[in-house]
Image (cartoon, rainbow, N blue to C red):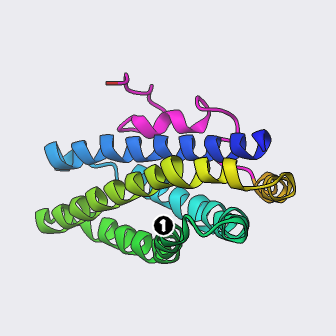
Amino acid sequence: MRAALSILDAEHRGYATVLRALSRHLEVVRAQPAATNHDLLSTILGYADSFMERFHHPKEDEYLFRALRSRTDEADEALLALQHEHATGPAVLRSLREALARSRGGSPDDLDAFAGGLERYIAEQQAHMRTEATLVLPLATRALQASDWEAIERAFRGHTDPFFGAGPLGRSASFFSPRFGSAPLEEA
């Protein structure tokens, strides 16, 4: 159980870092539109799509949520909502990436539309992770059996987070900088 929870926790911490980076860059988009780093924002959104939507969320659905449903119905409503968010996540990210691409032209309306979508995305993902952290994972620690945790651990060990696999100061540090390769910003 501990190993599986450790992997899940590490992936959630990594994604929380991504959301904080997006929040920092959203501040730049709002305060200094000309300083918007479209390439970095595209990279961050690409990470969310390629890792969270294609690896993390499907494995939560297939292994963690399925095991939890087999042991209890206590979280059925929350799991249904979370799985709906997992299913719609790729379309939301595609829409955000398209809005970001349109904003490259410098139109204030396009940049504002992207910023509004990004703000909603960040808030929704933070709420999603809160539900998993405060309801799903605590219930899973009480309800799941050793065999459930073994299957979950095997599934999640089967992929590596491209930004956070090497630790929190790996490639992700540049997410906080307005330019690639710059030092990370100080934590607020």
Query: Does the magenta stretch mainly form a helix, a strand or a loop?
Result: loop
Q: How crowded is mark 1: few (under 14 residues within 10 Å), some or many (20 or more)?
A: some
67 with respect to 77 (left or right): right
Which residue range is magenta in the image? 160-187
96 with respect to 62 (left or right): left
Res 182 → quadrant: top left
Q: Name the residue under label 1.
A: 78
Instruction: Please state the total of marks drawn on the protein image.
Output: 1
Residue at 17%, 48% in the rendered image? 30
The image shows residue 42 at horizontal and vertical percentages of 43, 58
The image shows residue 118 at horizontal and vertical percentages of 30, 59
23 with respect to 7 (left or right): left
- In the rendered image, the residue lying farthest to the top is 186
The image shows residue 143 at horizontal and vertical percentages of 70, 55
Residue 158 seen by the camera: yes
Residue at 52%, 77% in the rendered image? 87
Residue 180 seen by the camera: no
Quadrant of the rendering where the C terminus is positioned: top left
Q: In what element is the residue under mark 1?
A: helix
Q: Which of 15 and 170 is in front in this view?
A: 15
Residue at 70%, 70% in the rendered image? 66
106 with respect to 158 (left or right): left
Residue at 84%, 59% in the rendered image? 151
In this view, 59 is above or below 131: below
Res 170 → quadrant: top right
Res 59 → quadrant: bottom right
